[in-house]
Image (cartoon, rainbow, N blue to C red):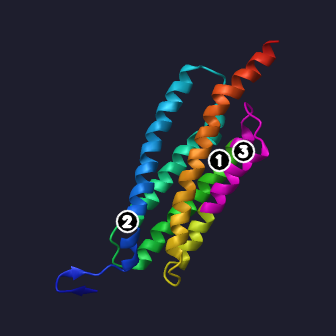
Amino acid sequence: MCRRGVTELAYPQLAVWQNFYMIVGSSGAALIGIQFIVITLVAELSRRTSADTVGAFGTPNVAHFGSALVISCIMSIPWTQVFPLAIVLGVCGVGGFLYSMLVIHRARRQTVYEPASEDWLWYHVFPCILYAVLILAAFWLRTRPNALFVIAIVALGLLLIGIHNAWDSVTYIVIDQPRAHSKKKE
């Protein structure tokens, strides 16, 4: 794989994706920082919550942003072989899927908020699907060039899920939770 001191990339097509992963990864990193600020501001409101509620509906947003960032970093590495790239992506997919199972457990265990069906989709089902698809794409990477598109869709999907869920959480805390609290006082 080495000619005249130049190492060939295992997947020269990855070079075409560099701008995409720079955008997705940078966005994920910036949104992680914003999520920390939001959590800090929300904590000052001192509303009733639990560790399981935050673990089911807050922390996963940071995890999804982080996953988009990590996938972007992995895909930006100048890999000289496809197999290690596939292994690393597969491990990320398995880790994300297992984490999603833990989040579902936390959501069922917490008692502060009753999730609606839309919440189950966005916070639990969609992330599980994306992490499972990442595992499949890692297996396909060696034989199907379209796997690069699938991996890009997973990274972007995790970023968009994180954005949706962060917005959903903030609007609930700012709009819906005060309404529910004032109805209990009446």
Q: Nearer the viewer, residue 65 or 91?
A: 65
Marks 2 and 1, how far apart at CA: 31 Å
Residue at the (78%, 46%) spot, across then down: 117
Q: Which numbered disc, 3 or 2, marks the residue that appears first in the sequence?
A: 2
Q: Nearer the viewer, residue 13 or 74?
A: 13
Q: Residues at badges 1 and 3 in contact (C-beta under 8 Å)?
A: no
Q: Nearer the viewer, mark 3 or mark 2?
A: 2
In percent of width and height, residue 77 lies at: 35, 67
In percent of width and height, residue 27 lies at: 44, 49
Q: Which numbered disc, 1 or 3, marks the residue that appears first in the sequence?
A: 1
Residue at the (66%, 53%) spot, across then down: 101
Marks 1 and 3, how far apart at CA: 12 Å
In percent of width and height, residue 152 lies at: 51, 65
Residue at the (64%, 28%) spot, across then down: 173
Classified by dominant secondary structure, the portion drawn in magenta counts as: helix
Q: Is residue 118 magenta?
A: yes
In percent of width and height, residue 135 lies at: 57, 69
Q: Which residues are magenta?
A: 107-130
User: In the drawing, what numbered circle is on residue 103?
Assistant: 1
Local crowd size for mark 1, using a 10 Å CA cut-off: few (<14), some (14–19), many (≥20) = many
Q: Nearer the viewer, residue 108 or 76?
A: 76
Return the residue at label 3: 119
The three-letter code of the residue at mark 1 reads Val
Marks 3 and 2, how far apart at CA: 33 Å
Local crowd size for mark 2, using a 10 Å CA cut-off: few (<14), some (14–19), many (≥20) = some
Residue at the (38%, 62%) spot, across then down: 19
SS type, badge 1 = helix
Q: Residues at badges 3 and 2 in contact (C-beta under 8 Å)?
A: no
Visible residue check, residue 51? no
The three-letter code of the residue at mark 3 reads Asp
SS type, badge 2 = helix
